[in-house]
């Protein structure tokens, strides 16, 4: 059993704190930043079978409280309830834009033959290297979406499966990221953790011969929500009128019942009469959610006191964190539809889909950055329709969002954020889109980024002292106000040990002193 630990870590060129640990240098890429991390050990340590929603809330709050100080989080957790914790945290973490990875082991890490060391190191490596802003579960060479997994084996190292969604990342000699399915929050709001979970929920599994009396007893108060595990593609005995009446009585009284299949793979469908009978009884289809995801989502939604019963039902229909497969995906143009790609492919004598995809992936980061520079939304949309990812960086690691922020193209910034571009991206010099907007003095962009949850990195805050003192010495009020808007600390000393107000006083900048004296 693996106790629950939380690892806070960051990509860093140097060790931050005396008690920080650092992963070894990446031999394949010696220039890559090393990953520094700190460990917070919970007291008491819990076997995962004893985990409750209160423990989920504690983990979530620790992530929220440390969110601005670290680039991501790794949680060590026992395997028995790991899928429940991963699902619950995926819903509790609202507007997440940094990786949170849960991992553990089947065999204790101190045994000679164990899977714990590799799971931990690779989880740290993935979370410290790749922009995957989801709650994920890493196990046995695979990173899965946290709300898509279920435990399928009590003895094998391959303990978990994601029946209806391919892994986000596959590891081996190389690490392969399936960027096409990485979930990105598209709402321009700050990260927060919703710790309230309604515990008046349950799982009810149908079986041949289950009686209406049993079902009716299960659905009595204080139960408020139930995941009904049905046969096949969401079927129940439609000839048992008493059973259907029991379900109808419960839904009429305000109990929310969600239909999920007992099958490992597949989705709930209303094709058969037996499935349609449940809909008539007021039971909501749960698509292809796992029981763990469906139960924790129901618990999360029922706890929303500001929503009416009908609004809660509507939210349960929505794909909140990628926990279900949408009925209709967004149509995308084929690579062969792009004349531009065709022309390049012809000149390079390329023909197969893989080669065309490689050309697209090599060209589109620079093309997207060029479109962001001019604020060309149509070009960005066209690149997206070709299957391009608008959050990849160019040869300098600068993403389209970096460029749009430098140029002050507010519409382009809004569009990119709506497509899931991360405000925490760093270029090869460690600069974020927020620091770019501050340096080039685009106030509206700074305000938008801050509303979306952007913050200055530790490196940027460390280096801000020099620029702040320079601005204070020259009496640049506008520049100082922008840095404050971005979250800079005016009390932070510069290279000579003096802070902004001390420098302003020494330089005779009375207006700066009068304006910012309250900040001290």
Image: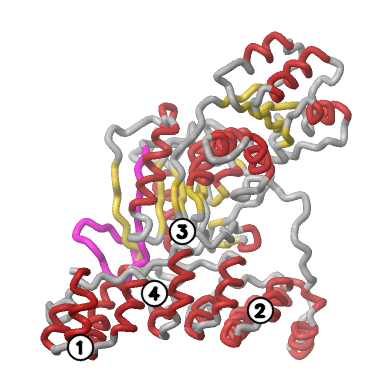
| 189 part of magenta stretch | no
The span shown in magenta is 4-25
- How much space separates mark 4 and mark 1, taking CA atoms? 40 Å
First of labels 3, 2 by sequence position:
3
Instruction: Identify residue for label 4.
Output: 30
Instruction: Identify residue for label 2.
Output: 377
As drawn, the label of residue 208 is none
First of labels 4, 3 by sequence position:
4
Pinpoint residue 157: horizontal percent, then vertical percent.
52, 40
As drawn, the label of residue 473 is 1
Q: Quadrant of the N terminus?
A: top left
First of labels 4, 1 by sequence position:
4
- How much space separates mark 1 and mark 2, taking CA atoms? 40 Å
As drawn, the label of residue 190 is 3
In which quadrant of the rendered view does residue 342 lie? bottom right
First of labels 1, 3 by sequence position:
3
- How much space separates mark 4 and mark 2, taking CA atoms? 37 Å
- How much space separates mark 4 and mark 3, taking CA atoms? 35 Å
Quick one: label 3, few (<14), some, or many (20+) residues within 10 Å?
A: some
């Amino acid at each position: 059993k693996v106790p629950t630990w939380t690892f806070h870590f960051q990509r860093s060129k140097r060790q931050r704190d005396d008690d920080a640990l650092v992963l070894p240098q990446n031999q394949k890429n010696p220039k890559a930043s090393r990953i520094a991390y700190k460990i917070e050990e919970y007291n008491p340590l819990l076997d995962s079978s004893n985990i409750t929603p209160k423990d989920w809330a504690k983990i979530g709050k620790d992530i929220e409280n440390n969110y601005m100080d670290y680039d991501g989080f790794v949680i060590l957790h026992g395997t028995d309830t790991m899928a429940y914790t991963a699902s619950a945290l995926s819903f509790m973490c609202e507007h997440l834009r940094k990786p949170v990875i849960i991992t553990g082991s089947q065999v204790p890490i101190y045994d000679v033959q164990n899977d714990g060391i590799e799971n931990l190191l690779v989880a740290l490596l993935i979370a410290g290297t790749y922009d995957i802003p989801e709650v994920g579960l890493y196990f046995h060479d695979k990173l899965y979406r946290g709300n898509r997994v279920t435990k399928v084996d009590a003895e094998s190292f391959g303990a978990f499966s994601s029946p209806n969604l391919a892994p986000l990342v596959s590891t081996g000699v190389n690490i392969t990221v399936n960027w096409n399915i990485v979930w990105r929050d598209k709402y321009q709001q700050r990260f927060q953790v919703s710790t309230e979970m309604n515990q008046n929920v349950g799982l009810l599994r149908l079986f041949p011969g289950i009686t209406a009396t049993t079902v009716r007893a299960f659905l009595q108060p204080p139960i408020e929500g139930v995941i009904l595990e049905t046969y096949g593609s969401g079927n129940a005995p439609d000839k048992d009128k008493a059973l259907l009446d029991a379900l109808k009585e419960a839904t009429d009284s305000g109990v929310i019942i969600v239909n999920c299949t007992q099958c490992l793979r597949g989705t709930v469908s209303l094709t058969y009469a037996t499935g349609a009978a449940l809909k008539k009884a007021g039971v909501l289809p749960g698509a292809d959610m796992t029981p763990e995801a469906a139960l924790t989502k129901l618990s999360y939604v029922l706890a929303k006191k500001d929503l009416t019963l009908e609004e809660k039902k509507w939210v349960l229909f929505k794909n909140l964190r990628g926990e279900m497969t949408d009925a209709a995906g967004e149509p995308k143009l084929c690579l062969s539809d792009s004349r531009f790609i065709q022309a390049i492919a012809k000149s390079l004598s390329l023909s197969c889909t893989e080669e065309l995809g490689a050309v697209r992936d090599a060209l589109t980061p620079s093309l997207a950055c060029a479109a962001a520079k001019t604020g060309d939304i149509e070009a960005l949309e066209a690149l997206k329709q070709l299957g391009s990812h608008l959050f990849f960086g160019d040869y300098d690691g600068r993403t389209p969002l970096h460029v749009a922020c430098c140029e002050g193209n507010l519409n382009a910034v809004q569009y990119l954020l709506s497509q899931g571009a991360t405000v925490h991206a760093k270029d090869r010099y460690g600069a974020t889109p927020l620091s770019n907007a501050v340096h080039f003095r685009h106030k509206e962009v700074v305000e938008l980024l801050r509303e979306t949850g952007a913050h200055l990195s530790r490196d940027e805050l460390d280096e801000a002292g020099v620029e702040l003192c320079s601005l204070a010495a020259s009496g640049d009020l506008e520049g100082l106000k922008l840095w404050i808007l971005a979250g800079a600390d005016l009390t932070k000393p510069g290279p000579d040990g003096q802070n902004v107000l001390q420098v302003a006083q020494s330089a005779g900048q009375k207006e700066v002193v009068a304006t910012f004296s309250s900040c001290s």
